[in-house]
Image (cartoon, rainbow, N blue to C red):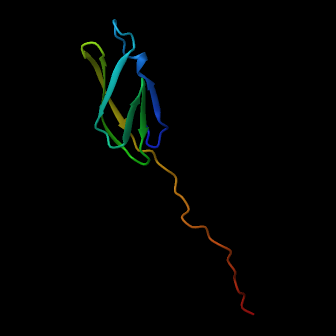
Amino acid sequence: MEQNSESILFDLANYFYDIENGSDLEYSIYENIDAIESSIVGTLLTLIINENQIGEGTITIAASDNIDRSVASFTFNITIIEVNQPPVVNDKIGRASVRERV
């Protein structure tokens, strides 16, 4: 992924399923990347790329059923790469006046 990318949403119900519970699962996330903030609300996993941050690490998503707390999980690697950003003008030049010598 590139730095300053838009947030990414995953519906975890598309990735986990329990034969007894269907998609009635409890999810948790573990990640070790300073460049990302993550959260799970319901079945939606959101990954937010922190502005001007780069880095790499792993993300583990776990799902447990609500019967005997059995757990299924998967881990993936993610890298946030630097993108060349154009220079910016810090201060605009105001109106300039020039005096001519006579």
Q: Residue at x 35, y 36 (%)?
A: 79
Residue sitting at x 38%, y 15% = 24
In-image side of 49 versus 28 (left or right): right
With respect to residue 6, does 15 lie above or below? above
Which residue is nearer to you in this view: 85 or 37? 37
Q: Residue furthest front?
A: 67
Residue lying at the far bottom in this picture: please name it. Answer: 102
- Which residue lies at the image location 42% right of the left edge and 40% below the top edge? 49
Left or right, 21 with reference to 85? left
**Looking at the figure, which quarter contains the N terminus?**
top left
User: From what the image shows, is residue 101 above or below residue 37?
Assistant: below
In front: 48, or 18? 18
3 to the left or right of 31: right
- Residue toward you, 44 or 50: 44
> Residue 89 in the image: x percent, y percent?
56, 62
The percent coordinates of residue 74 (x first, y second) are: 30, 21
Q: Provide residue 20's location: percent of width, then percent of height.
A: 33, 6
